[in-house]
Image (cartoon, grey):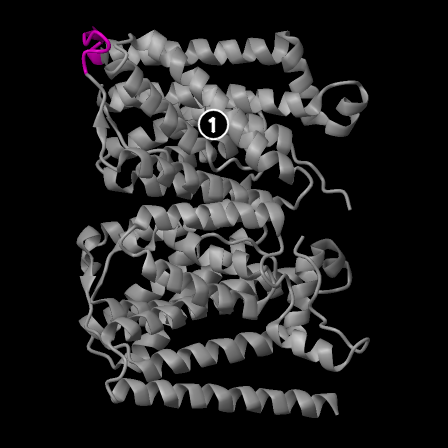
Amino acid sequence: MELIQQLVNGISLGSIYALIALGYTMVYGIVRLINFAHGDVFMVGAFVGFYAVTSLDLGFFPALLLAMIACALLGVFIERIAYKPLRNATRIAALITAIGVSLLIEYGTIYVRGAQPEAYPSTLLPAKSIEIFGVTISSQALLILCTSIVLMILLQLIVHKTKIGKAMRAVSYDAEAARLMGINVDNTISATFAIGSALAGAAGVIFGVYYIKIEPLMGIIPGLKAFIAAVLGGIGIIPGAMVGGLVLGVIESLVSGLGYSLWRDGVAFIVLILILIFRPSGLFGKNVKEKV
Amino acid sequence: MTAFKRINGFWLSIVLALVFFAVVQLLISGGMLNSFYINTLFFMAINIILAVSLHLIIGITGQFSIGHAGFLAVGAYASAIMTMKLQMPFALALLVGGVAAAVAGLLIGIPTLRLKGDYLAIATLGFGEIVRIILLNVEYVGGASGMTVTHLTTWPWVFFCLLMTIIVIANFTNSTHGRACISIREDEIAADSMGINTTYYKVTAFVIGSFFAGIAGGLYAHNFYIIQPTNFGFLKSFDILIFVVLGGLGSMSGAVIAAILLTVVSTFLQDYPETRMIIYSIVLILVMLYRPKGLLGTQELTSFFRLRRAVGGKQNDNKHTVA
């Protein structure tokens, strides 16, 4: 039963990783950039949700929506200011800029509101627990899981059934050809950043509700782990990010469950290095030959 | 004739460096520099060693590593264990720190250097984090509360380690090996098809870079009284990275200048760590947007003098961009 309990915890954690990883993977798929600032967008989402709940007295879902909108705007803003001028620069230049943006958001937040942590109010969601076959599932965990799944289904619908989703797939396949077909590549890239950042914002609120404590540097580790999840599933592949997030969450919970909770972060990075060495294209990726 | 000039220039710089060393040593032993300036000077030298060692990996070989603080940590802890736990002399401790970091570099370099660009960056970042987490969990070195270290770092040690680093890396860059590394930076596939054993040269550069980072770690540990795993997090790697990027990817003098400049800036902003990080990050973004090749690009400081003397003559060989 202990094992199943850990699995349940792992899936809750993994669904948060998956939500963040989706943003990473979408952005990487379309502009080949590791958006280091993505973890910090997640942090901003958590804080927007927190202030929406405490200062504006909003409920869980309105706060979630507000955080998603704020993060979408932030994502587009970052893309327009920092990444768009570097569209044709070297990949290393873009990567360094992304690191710079990430630090700017982190320390800008500390500068504006101080480094002290905040605690999400525990009364936001009804705290009941359901027992199924001896496994205790809190109603919070259940609601979080449902929210994440709904958001992921929504994303799949956007990517596969709408015009903008079709444009996104076209641009990620071949930006030049897409431009020739009359697709506005810049707007499509902005839309990708908006959707990815909105998901990160949602993940931030969910994280706050589940783990209570939020602080300005909280985005670093979940951001890195979500990136690992994206690589695990095959970067650029949307279902891969979901599966990668869930797998990573379960692995971490199992390691904690075995009593090595201090090594949890280390395990995630070992998973990363192993996957990079043995299957760099990820679980769902195909090997692509490099053209000279 | 040119070879004679180059050798002359080499001895001239050595003599100048020794004069600088003697002057500072006199000032210190004469009590004319207070401990604040001495400390800043030590930090500057350690930062220069770190910047130059990372410059070899990123600037010369073009392998984007952002886990350099991991090697610093390995060197710092290895040398601290030698002096504090095993009562070994400081010189041996420094050497062991360097060798331990080089071994770590070899172990991490062989598998990860097959990766390219973004993936290599993330793998080295992961390595840095793993080192930090291991140190956090090993009770022998004090876990999270860290390890107390006696103050052994003195000006002669700092200076000679710095001099060795610069001489070795400058000579490496101008050797056959260095040329091979530059060719890998310019175009790895082309270098490979010209018969250069790319893996061998990438790993060599990586190991030498980590060796000197380990030496810097030994100096750092014995300058600080206490070392903690939190000192060697991602932010430390980022500090080193910004020296190299700001100075110009591929320019050693650029890295040195950037290290000096930023050490001074961060000493002044010591009491305002947030402001310092905000300035750092804005500088990094602006440099990438408006001058992506950094302060000096791939030029060296000396090449400006050479250019003036021989217009239209042989130019610096190391002037291409980092791909």
Q: Is residue A16 above or below residue B295?
A: above
Q: Is residue A189 above or below residue B242?
A: above
Residue A124 drawn in magenta: yes
Name the residue that disc number 1 marks: A21
Give the residue drawn at x 33%, y 73%: B42
| Residue at horizontal 24 percent and vertical 56 percent from the top | B228
Work out whether residue B290 or residue B21 is closer to the camera in this orientation and state it. B290
The three-letter amino acid code for the residue at tag 1 is: Ala
Residue B295: x percent and y percent?
A: 58, 60
Q: Is residue A224 left or right of residue B118?
A: left
A43 within the magenta span: no
Q: Quadrant of residue B83?
A: bottom left
Segment tinted magenta in the rendering = A122-136
x and y percent of residue B321 in the render? 68, 57
Residue visible at 38% across and 21% down? A203
Q: Is residue B207 visible?
A: no
> Residue A244 location in percent, x, y?
46, 27
In this orientation, which residue lies closer to the viewer: A220 or A288?
Answer: A220
Q: Main secondary structure of the magenta part?
A: loop
Q: Is residue B295 placed above or below A22 in the rendered structure?
A: below
Where residue A62 sits in the image (x, y, percent)? Answer: 35, 8
- Please state if B305 lies on the left or on the right of A28 as rendered: right
Is disc 1 placed on a helix, strand or loop? helix
Q: Quadrant of residue A207?
A: top left
Residue B162 in sight: yes
Count all numbered tags in the image, as a single digit. Answer: 1
